[in-house]
Amino acid sequence: MTQHSGHEPVRNSARGPVRTLDDVDQALVHALQIAPRAGWNEIGAVLGLDAVTVARRWHRLTEAGAAWISCSPSPALAASGQGLLAVVEVDCSSGSLLTVARALAELPHVTAVEHVSGDRDLLLTLMATDLAALTRWVTRGIGAMQGIVATRTHLASTVYTEGSRWRLRALDRTQIARLAGTGTPRTDTPVFPLTDLDHALVGALSMNGRATFRALADACGASPDTIRRRLGRLFAAGMLQPRCEVARPLSDWPVTVILWGKAAAAELESVSRAVTSAREVRLCAGLTGRNNVLVVAWVKSLADAQRFEVRLAQRAPGLDITDRAVALWPLKLSGHLLDERGYRIGGVPLDVRAAGATLQNSEDTP
């Protein structure tokens, strides 16, 4: 086991390899996609298994990097003015792509790094506290990195759907309904300013969305009761999004396709609703710029990527696809580091404040 630049240790995902998900594994992953923090007794009761069995199954999947649970700030924070989401295209000089990609993957505010086909080398998804922090990081942070030739930044104005809503669909309606009633219910609690403790909780949960109150208390320097109350309020206000992820080769949808498109401003809402209803879609966001729609989907094959685009045109005729790419290697997803096959090998805790901190440090350097 080797250390990954001070972050979570990188593990050898080949240890105890998981090549396929059997019916029980699929049901377990689907259950955790619906209720990521539900207790093992609750999960087991829905699946018809005992708690020890489901816990042991989950441990095996996580140890092999086949599945994991993360957590990230929700779009509600951006809507309240507490941060923003951006997509950055990066062009690299010859021979520097892997070095640049790995350096970017180490940054806690860069939530995703993908080596993609087409007119850009890398596609980044990142969070920043505000436009000033984003602008300064793009110009003085990433702009000063060796091996980067050019960047193009696009702001996400609205996120219509994202990866926490994607499902394997291994459970029946009754099981889904039972799981939907677990966890902290969403209430009318308004979004509130994040404290240092909240940011620490986001970082800890981003690496293990099932972390216990005691583990979170130890990581964040607070009492378990304080953590319980704080998390309850964060979840009730819809400010956090836990999600269960599965390695792409195990999902039967191993190819990630990225589409950029245009829709008339008056039709953007209706077009996006039509796009998000497609099972393959993992992300649909409104962007500022020449292309105002970004779609990320998981499909069965490269041939299916073309068929998906045809199906999407039928579903959302108001969307004009202008560019497309395939993710050749998603190096990082929601803070988690992946190998070339898509298995988890480590992680970098998320911190939306890091862009500004990185910039301040760079400015202080003579």
Image: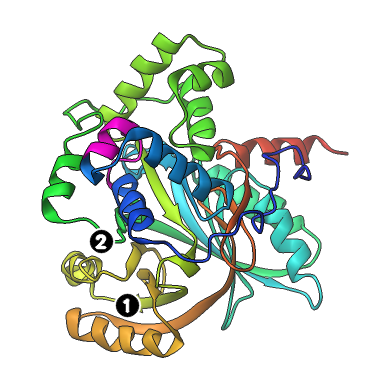
Q: Residue at x 48, y 34 (%)?
A: 205
Q: Secondary structure at mark 2?
A: loop
- Indicate yes or no whether the magenta region holds residue 5: no
Residue 218 image point, x, y percent: 56, 16
Q: Residues within 10 Å of mark 2 (few under 14, many from 20)?
A: some
Quadrant of the image containing the C terminus:
top right
Residue 169 - label: 2
Label located before the other in sequence (2 or 1): 2
Q: Nearer the viewer, residue 254 or 90?
A: 254
229 vs 95, left or right, is left
User: Which residue was labeled with disc 1?
Assistant: 262
Query: Considering only vertical position in the picture, is 339 above or below 230?
Result: below
Q: Residue at x 38, y 54 (%)?
A: 25
| Count of labels in the image | 2
Residue 76 image point, x, y percent: 31, 40
Q: Cβ–Cβ below 8 Å for labels 2 and 1?
A: no
Q: Residue furthest right?
A: 366
- Check disc 1 and give the amino acid type: Lys
Q: Is residue 127 visible?
A: no
Task: Look at the image and give the residue range highlighted in magenta.
Answer: 34-45
Residue 329 image point, x, y percent: 60, 70
Q: Nearer the viewer, residue 365 or 340?
A: 340
Q: Residue at x 56, y 64 (%)?
A: 342
Q: Residues within 10 Å of mark 1 (few under 14, many from 20)?
A: many
